[in-house]
Amino acid sequence: MRLTPQQVEAIRTVVREQAGPEAVVYLFGSRVDDAARGGDVDLMVELPTPVEEPALLAARIAGRISRALEERKVDVVVAAPNLMCLPIHDVARREGVRL
């Protein structure tokens, strides 16, 4: 995993603040591969309860994490009981690392 402990803690903090303490966050994509270089930070935030405005939540989380990680590009997908499960969610669960 190509994130420092400080970056992981910053991600966890933002997710807790924006999505609540029950949210689970997964890192997936190229940042999971220690041999890769560069790349954005791909995250899935999984919630146990329905989300009213998932796009707004994802944008808020992505923006705050990007600022905390020195403007690195951050992509966030949200998973919740009221949202359709997409292939990207399956990839994040299967290949991702829970932070």
Image (tube, rainbow, N blue to C red):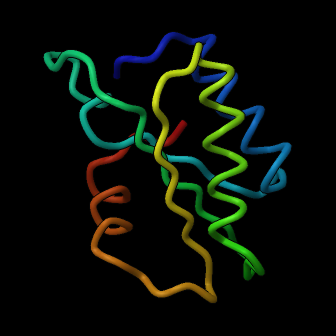
Which residue is nearer to you in this view: 41 or 20?
A: 41
Q: Height in image: 59 above or below 10?
A: below
Residue depicted at 50% across the width and 60% down the height? 77
Residue depicted at 35% across the width and 46% down the height? 96
Quadrant including the N terminus:
top left
The number of discs equals 0
Quadrant in which residue 86 is drawn: bottom left
Residue 81 is left or right of residue 23, and the answer is left
Q: Height in image: 90 above or below 24?
A: below
Q: Height in image: 59 above or below 98?
A: below
Quadrant in which residue 89 is drawn: bottom left
Which residue is nearer to you in this view: 58 or 29?
A: 58
Which residue is nearer to you in this view: 25 or 78?
A: 78
Q: Position of residue 91 (x, y in %)?
A: 27, 60
Quadrant in which residue 65 is drawn: top right
Residue depicted at 21% across the width and 27% down the height? 33
Q: Position of residue 2 (x, y in %)?
A: 35, 17
Residue 72 is left or right of residue 36, and the answer is right
Q: Position of residue 63 (x, y in %)?
A: 66, 38
Residue 78 is left or right of residue 95, and the answer is right
Residue 26 is left or right of residue 8, and the answer is left
Quadrant including the C terminus:
top right
Q: Height in image: 80 above or below 25?
A: below
Residue sticking out furthest to the left: 35
